[in-house]
Image (cartoon, rainbow, N blue to C red):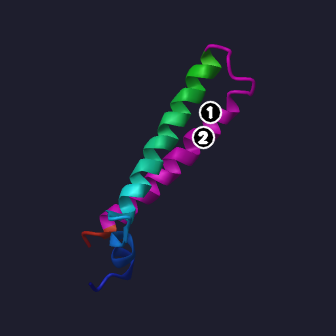
Amino acid sequence: MANPIAAYIIQRVFGIPLIVYGGVFTILCFLITASIGILVRKDKWPYSFNWHLGMAYFSLTIALVHALLAITLYL
């Protein structure tokens, strides 16, 4: 394989490619973001709405990195 990034992404950990773990982490980040938003709306979250915004930015960043790494598999 000519692309060293693709070789790293395809590495298997416990029989599953590394990119799959990145996808699961991305989904978990979005679920946590949605949970924080729901809890803030119902006034059951003791922190401000800024936590939800910060987690949303973090989730989008992780999703973009995950997408770019997945795209490099096909380049």
Few, some or many C-alpha atoms within 10 Å of disc 1 (few <14, some 14-19, many ≥20)?
many
Q: Residue at point 48% right, 38% down?
A: 30
Q: Is residue 72 above or below residue 2?
A: above
Question: Is the stretch drawn in magenta largely helix, strand or loop?
Answer: helix
Residue 20, quarter of picture: bottom left
Image quarter in which the N terminus is found: bottom left
Residue 55, quarter of picture: top right
Q: Which mark is residue 52?
A: 1
Q: Residue at point 42% right, 56% down?
A: 21
Q: Is residue 41 above or below residue 19?
A: above
The residue positioned farthest toward the front in the image shown: 14
- Spatial CA span between label 1 and label 2: 5 Å
Magenta residue span:
42-71
Q: Which mark is residue 55?
A: 2
Q: Residue at point 69% right, 33% down?
A: 50
The residue positioned farthest toward the top in the image shown: 42
Provide residue 73's location: percent of width, then percent of height: 29, 69
